[in-house]
Amino acid sequence: MRSIMRYIPLQILLLLTLLLSCKPEEERKVIQPNELREVGKLELVEYRSEEIFVISSDQKSLESIRSLEEAADYLSSLFEIGDRIGIYSFDFYTIAYINLYDLQDSDLQYDQENKSIQLTLPPIEVEPIGRGGTLKLLHERVNGNKKSITSEERQNMQRQAVVLAKQNIRPGTPKYQELVTKAQSKAQAYFSSILRARGYEEIEIRFTQSYEKAN
């Protein structure tokens, strides 16, 4: 499996609006919850995984044969002349984000005298992009008396690939924790920059407990 992780450009215009507000200097130091809620869904990290799948004539094992019909098909394939193989790659995309719509007024705690602020952000959420991923043909060869690879076989393989990809990003898996950690680090860097631009010197950024752990 190959994977690529990259940072998504954030809603730059909205964040720049927070930084480059035209209000007087003293007013700009107080950041309001509504300003952050306007950003909405803040995508932080995109992750692409790639799996390689093979369909071949010798793919079926005796353990997977569950009927006389399947046994007959398997034995028949052993005596057929020729090759039957399909090699495919499956790309699956996932994002890690925070939903700033969920930010509460109480999540911002100020101390204007000491120029300090505590920001509690909503939990990092991890979810797939789209439904079925992307299946690409790398190599396909059917000759001799072998049966052609059917669209149903490819669809079944793609469904299995989606299930596997989703299992790899479930809460509690190493990949899920990696995505959450990278997204938290990215969020802390962005919001620390915004708050420093507003004049705060002591900044503490926290995250609320994830929904998966809370439920």
Image (cartoon, grey):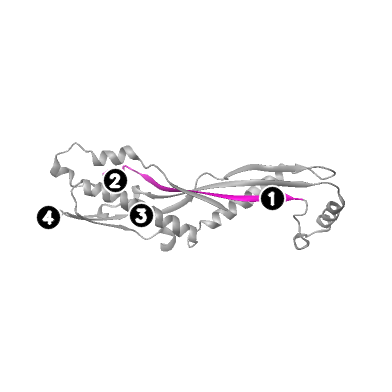
The kind of residue on which mark 2 rests is: Leu
Spatial separation of the CA atoms under disc 2 and disc 1: 47 Å
- Disc sitting over residue 36 in the figure: 2
The kind of residue on which mark 1 rests is: Val
Circle nearer the N terminus (2, 3): 2
- Residue 83 image point, x, y percent: 79, 47
The residue located at (50%, 45%) in the rendering is 129
The kind of residue on which mark 3 rests is: Ser
Image check: 126 left or right of 166?
A: left
At label 3, counting other C-alpha atoms closer than 10 Å, the crowd grade (few under 14, some 14-19, many 20 or more) is few
Spatial separation of the CA atoms under disc 1 and disc 4: 65 Å
The kind of residue on which mark 4 rests is: Glu
- Residue 41 image point, x, y percent: 38, 45
* Residue of label 1: 54
Helix, strand or loop at label 3? It is helix
Circle nearer the N terminus (1, 4): 1
